[in-house]
Image (cartoon, grey):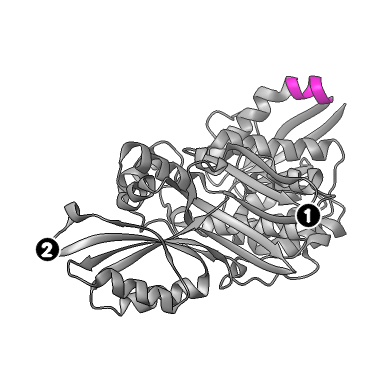
Amino acid sequence: MKKLRIGLCGTGNVGFAFAETIINSKSLINQNYGLDLSISLIGARKGKVPGLENIKVIKDIQEVPLSDEVDVVVELIGGVEESFKLAKAALNNKKHFVTANKALIAAHSKELFEIAKQNQVHLGFEASVAGGIPIIRVIRDGLMSNQINSFAGILNGTSNFIFSKMAEEGLSFETALSLAQKEGFAEPDPTFDISGQDAAQKTCILATLSFFKHAVIENVHYEGIDNISTQDIDYGKQLQLVLKPLSIGMSKNNKFTLGSFPAFVKEKSLLASIQNESNAVLMNTESTGGTMYAGPGAGAKPTSNSVLTDIIDIARGKIFDYQEFVKTSLDASFEDFSCGHYLRMEVSDEAGVIAKISTVMAENGLSIDNLIQKELDKKEDVIPLVIVTSNSEEKVIQKVISDLRELSEVKNSISHLRILDI
């Protein structure tokens, strides 16, 4: 029977759930795969882990990859600097390394892939993207023979949970975020989630694997969700649109577009049905066309399950060489990305305003596909106005928004959301 000894670094929600999964699944894994998996060592700064008293604990997590009692190091501490140091120590000591840390992989995949190959050990990061969806192995194994043209998906469960609650229950952004924190789908400090950075890091990882080019976060145009209001969601409903936190990667004629931002999709879109903390990824390839993968995207148990699948791969002798994916760098531009656009603004209640706005759009080659003007919501001679535009490139819509802001009839800020036909 093949034995594998695990050194666990990090015993927060995910780390503890992973330990429980190993313990509770031990007999099943033994029966199904003939493997004996066990946690032989824990790295925890407090020096003890309630509930795991039978496992040896050391305070210095950097000592874990140096131990002769460890075959694979599992990193669940988060952050980049200390995790990077831990990863290098593990790989250079010929220990397999498994992580759920998207920030680490997005920032240092190139160097870590090279070290893993040099030492003939496996670097597993299935849990770094889309929680319980095995999207890494889908791209790596299932779509290996296909040219991937694009991907689009919901990669941040926290943001999707917030949008779902705002749409279903009419909650404000702040109330929905508090609920996400209470339910364990958002961190006490939710900055990475609501700023879009978390999804952008995951977009980097998917882009690197999909396009066989090394993507970094500077390649990704990303925007946060903290400026979204229930007004936008309600107007979207009137237009048969659903707001989602989307991440995209597109390849056409060896030109690449990467982005993570809130956007509307049509009610009939598959992604419109993905609710709460769930994630989904739509892949488009030359041979198979479109396929979608959906499942839990946030939470300790789905993440720990993905970590475990990487460990089972290792125990069964799977060592994957990722170095080919990062031999060349990916260059991306967002200014040529084209889609429809939603603009919400407040305008003066006077004749000729719509004509002036139409003129600005026409001068930039854009037309109005739909318009909502809410007379009943008028406040102090200012009326809310929503415009849906025809498809335009990003550089064009940004010029239109800039020109509209120059009109004296347009008051306050302009809310801009993209509309994707996916």
Is tag 1's residue or tag 2's residue first in the polypeptide sequence? 1
Q: Amino acid at mark 2?
A: Glu
Q: Mark 2 — residue? A: 380
Q: Nearer the viewer, residue 339 or 291?
A: 339
Q: Residue, x 48% and y 42% (percent of image)?
A: 267
> Element at badge 1?
helix
Q: Could you tell me if residue 45 is visible in this image?
A: yes
Q: Nearer the viewer, residue 240 or 122?
A: 240
User: Is residue 376 toward the left or the right of residue 310 in the image?
Assistant: left
Q: The N terminus is located in which quarter? A: top right
Label 2 crowd (10 A; few <14 / some 14-19 / many >=20): few
Q: How far across and how far down the image is residue 16, in percent?
A: 57, 35
Q: Amino acid at mark 1?
A: Leu
Q: How far across and how far down the image is residue 186, in percent?
A: 44, 45
| Residues shaded magenta | 28-33
Residue 14 located within the stretch drawn in magenta: no
Q: Mark 1 — residue? A: 91
Q: How far across and how far down the image is residue 99, in percent?
A: 67, 48
Q: Is residue 42 above or below residue 91?
A: above
> Element at badge 2?
loop
Spatial separation of the CA atoms under disc 1 and disc 2: 65 Å
Q: Could you tell me if residue 47 is visible in this image?
A: no
Q: How far across and how far down the image is residue 322, in percent?
A: 80, 56
